[in-house]
Image (spheres, rainbow, N blue to C red):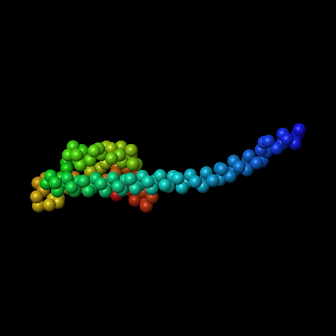
Amino acid sequence: MTRRWRQRGFTLIELMVVISIIVILLSLAIPNYSSSILHAKETALRDDLYTMRSLIDQYTLDKQKAPQSLQDLVDAKYLKQLPKDPFTNSRDSWVPVTDESIMSPDQTEPGIIDVHSGSDQTSSEGTAYSTW
């Protein structure tokens, strides 16, 4: 009878070994997961900046005037809505750059020429996101 009872369960040592292996595997996986999340956010930021910069140029060439705010891109249906900055998690944190330069001879009004992230964090490359 005692022999059968022993064969049904796991010993405390076996359970501790399995739990230790799981903890070791998790300690190796969590840093990789964190870095992959950071790289995904950086990629999303690069894509959003590229899209908005292209649309600013397209708006300027189409309308012969630069947008005066980023909301002009939404109002003119170039964007459905402003994207969320992945690091500030806000649509209102984008920092537009205005200049008095003219993109083409037909342009009648200067305005926004570039856009940057409003985040004060530093990227994995060592540069500030606000300089991208």
**Which of these two is toward me, 41 or 6?**
6
Name the image quarter holding residue 31. Answer: bottom right
Observer able to see residue 36: yes
- Quarter of the figure that contains the C terminus: bottom left
Q: Report the residue that reaches farthest toward the top.
A: 1
Q: Quadrant of the N terminus?
A: top right
Q: Is residue 29 left or right of residue 119?
A: right
Residue found 19% across the figure and 48% down from its top = 68
Image x and y of residue 111, in percent = 19, 52
Q: Position of residue 62 (x, y in %)?
A: 16, 54
Q: Is residue 120 left or right of residue 65?
A: right
Which residue: 73% across, 47% down? 16
Out of 45 and 123, give the one closest to the viewer.
45
Residue 55: x and y, percent? Answer: 24, 53
The percent coordinates of residue 2 (x first, y second) are 88, 39
- Camera-side residue of 68 and 40: 40
| Residue at the image point whose x is 20% and y is 46% from the top | 76
Determine the image quadrant of residue 61.
bottom left
Q: Residue at x 29, y 50 (%)?
A: 95
Left or right of 22? Residue 94 is left
Q: How many labels does the image show?
A: 0
Residue 114 visible: no
